Amino acid sequence: MYRRLIAPGALAASLLLAIPASAADFEPGAAGIGDPYYPTYGNGGYDVSHYDLRLEYQPKTDLLEGTATILASSTQDLSRFNLDFGLTASEVRVNGKKARFAKSGVQELEVTPAAGLPKGTPFTVVVKYAGKPSEVKLWGFTSWQRTPDGGVAANEPEAAAWWFPSNDHPRDKATYDVSVSVPDGTQAISNGTLQSQSSKLGWTRFNWRSSKPQATYLATLAVGKFDITTDTTANGLPVVNAYSKDLGANEGAAKASVERTTEVAEWLETVFGTYPFEALGGYVPNVPSSFALETQTRPFYSPKQFANGSNVSVVVHELAHQWYGDSVSVDDWKDIWINEGFARYSQWLWSEKEGEGTAQELADYVYAQHPADDPFWQVEPGDPGAENQFDAAVYDRGAVAVQALRNAVGEKKFFAILKGWPKVHAYGNAGVSDFVRYAEKVSGKPLAGLFDTWLYQPVKPAASALGALSA
Ligand code: ARG
Ligand code: ZN
């Protein structure tokens, strides 16, 4: 039975008014969620709670097709709304009824429901679609990487629009069921837990569930021929790692790194508190790119990350993001320092633990490595600009800022802040100014000056700004 949910306000309105509110009172949702770096990312007027994707992917042709069912709720009287999407929709329904839809530019799908959606109404959108993701260029590029035996959706900040319609911004998190059918002998990897898999008529369907709020860019899909290892942590969480069967000389180093996921997560728990998700893992597809990404519960690693032998440090980085980035996500993309500064700093803490250099030594090294006239110091990690979102300064100067905080507040308060932040904002969103306030509250010290120096000045700070230990 289909139970139509009606918000109390909407119910009252429909009972009190003899005639329904005129369509003129309803307005289109904004084409962007309001991120200053990326005005068209995400959309206004609604909030998604769940994505159900039922897809089929044919590696031979790169054809992805299927149905997305989106559970959402209106946040204004809504006459029309946008989804961020680059493939081709063939039918859109809202609450079961056919809706009008049109492409606006290459990456926006405009949906006009048969009837307006009063503010606070839960609603269901069904989008039937198809397309070849690698051929779709949004913002002039593709984020879908085709491989000899499949394809992969993993990128930041843009990944979702190549494979499913969404409200594509970290501020609107949702849970996911991702079901993907692929030719027998091929696997589909996604976030969370594999609920089941079954084969018929030459196709195998993999049903994945990610049950904690997840940002759209952290949703991933990898299709290919993988070696899969499965295990359970001491706490009973499932661990699923996947390695392309085609990693060549990097296979050993990839496995020697990603197989340490459980050990690294256990150590990170001592620094950041309880691991926030229901599953763990990592996957290494045979892509030519050279980055890694903290896709929720199951980070993506390019084979090139392992070209020089094992690289546990990158595993530390991507797993640290599960707390700093995935559970607690940026409010706006300008808050990227909270993700990258702390993920880099966690690598320094790992180095400290392994006896390969303390965080202080690594901070001093970064400081000394970049002379005052190095453009490195012109990037402000607290507001780097869209073009510098992933500049080395966001990571390295960003981690020096964390060391400066440690020196200013002392060991006890510092580690209380590191562990407290993911707890107070678990599964939510927060920005740099929230972090500064939180650090001041926990430490009882005014820290605006310190953060201004390290995050918001386009110059190399004086050595004394790094704090007592390095002075
Ligand atoms: N969050 C990723 C990391 O540092 C950054 C990926 C950026 N690279 C890219 N091609 N978008 O682990
Ligand atoms: Zn990172």
Image (cartoon, grey):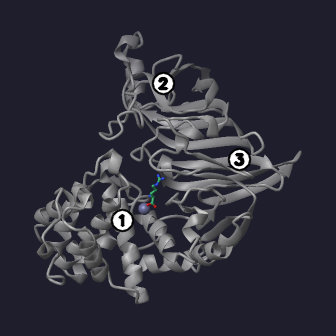
Name which residue type carries label 3: Val
Position of residue 194 relative to residue 50, above or below, is: below
Chain-order first, disc 3 or disc 1? 3
Q: In which quadrant of the rendered image does the C terminus lie?
A: bottom left
Name the element at disc 3. strand
- Ligand 2 quadrant assignment: bottom left
Q: Percent x, y for residue 261? A: 56, 74
Position of residue 325 relative to residue 366, above or below, is: above
Q: Nearer the viewer, residue 154 or 122?
A: 154
Q: Percent x, y for residue 464? A: 12, 76
Q: Percent x, y for residue 155? A: 51, 50
Name the residue rendered at 81%, 53% in the picture: 198
Q: Is residue 187 left or right of residue 304?
A: right
Q: Nearer the viewer, residue 44 or 78?
A: 44
Mark 1 Cα shell of 10 Å, populated few (<14), some (14-19), many (≥20): many
Name which residue type carries label 2: Gly
Name which residue type carries label 1: Pro
Looking at the rendered image, the disc whose residue lies closer to the viewer, 2 or 1, is: 2
Name the element at disc 1. helix
Q: Percent x, y for residue 340? A: 37, 62
**Which residue carries the number 1 mark?**
422
- Determine contact: label 3, label 1, CB under 8 Å: no
